[in-house]
Amino acid sequence: MLEKNDGHYTFAYYDANGNKHYKAKKGYNTQEQAVEMARKLNLSPQTVHKYSAYKCSICHKWHVGKNKYKTITEEDREKIRKQIQLENFYKKKSYGKYSRIIEEIS
Ligand SMILES: [Zn+2]
């Protein structure tokens, strides 16, 4: 039985004969989208294992995968929250600059 370890597939179901079936994982067009999903999953209280975004060598899109060897800690979640805060801060800051420039022009 071929194991799909290449990161493009995910387990789908067992058939009546007990064979594992796989399906293609959801593909994201950009790293940002995949990272956002991985963060969402990592911040969920139900999540035990850490998720990360990676580029797929088969479809060349981005996937979100679970690392079964890494357990997510409260420290990891705190890091993610800080990272999001920082990014939002810079997004707002540059947006503010942008709107000021528009005000000056108009
Ligand atoms: Zn893929």
Image (cartoon, rainbow, N blue to C red):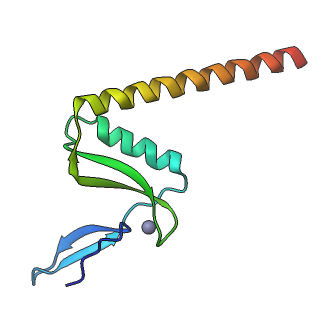
Q: Residue at x 10, y 81 (%)?
A: 16
Q: How many marks?
A: 0
Residue 46 relative to residue 5: left or right:
left
Image coordinates for residue 20, horizontal then vertical, percent = 18, 76
| Picture coordinates of residue 28, whole percent (x, y) | 49, 56
In what quadrant of the picture does the C terminus appear?
top right
Does the rendering let one see residue 106? no
- In which image quadrant can residue 102 be found? top right
Residue beneath the point at 36% across and 29% down:
79
Q: Is residue 69 above or below residue 8?
A: above
- How far across and how far down the image is residue 93, in percent? 64, 19
Q: Quadrant of residue 64?
A: bottom left
* Residue 91 in view of the camera: yes
Q: Quadrant of ligand 1?
A: bottom left
Outermost left residue: 17
Q: Position of residue 54 (x, y in %)?
A: 43, 56
Q: Residue at x 27, y 29 (%)?
A: 75
Q: Is residue 94 left or right of residue 49?
A: right
Would residue 18 be found to the left or right of residue 25 on screen? Answer: left
Looking at the image, is 88 positioned above or below residue 5?
above
Quadrant of the drawing holding the N terminus? bottom left
Q: Residue placed at 36% from the left, 39% from the top?
A: 40
